[in-house]
Amino acid sequence: MNPFEPLIEKILQHFAGPEFKGELAQAKSEFFDGPLDEENSESFDLRMCQFYDWYFLLGKCQVMGKPPLRFVTLSESSDFPKKRKR
């Protein structure tokens, strides 16, 4: 197992959560050429992985004005999404 997988999963779960539901829907419509039919698409899982990679690494989150990865790197990712007590 990649040592970064738990952190990546935690970050993706946060940015794919209810707080970002509208943001995620808008990003999906921007990324895909139309609705993606998961039942009739042989490449659904691959396309969704590509979408999440794009959204996390490059997609501009309207709430923060930057890609989710940029936000996480600026906010001490080891405690993400909690704030570190000082």
Image: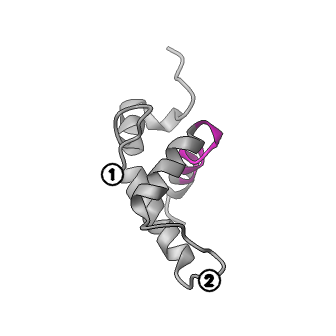
According to the picture, the residue beneath numbered tag 1 turns out to be 58
Considering the numbered disc 1 on the image, is that residue within a helix, a strand or a loop?
loop
Q: In the rendering, which numbered label is found on residue 40?
A: 2
Q: Label 2 crowding class (10 Å Cα cut-off): few <14, some 14-19, many 20+?
A: few
Locate residue 62, reporting x and y percent. Answer: 41, 36
The front one of 8 and 18 is 18
Q: Is residue 32 above or below residue 71?
A: below
Quarter of the N terminus within the rendering: bottom right
Q: Is residue 79 above or below residue 44?
A: above
The residue at 40%/60% (across/down) is: 31
The magenta-colored residue range is: 9-19
- Three-letter code for the amino acid on which mark 2 is drawn: Asn
Considering the numbered disc 2 on the image, is that residue within a helix, a strand or a loop?
loop
The residue at 57%/28% (across/down) is: 82
Q: How is the image coloured?
A: one colour
Locate residue 58, reporting x and y percent. Answer: 33, 51
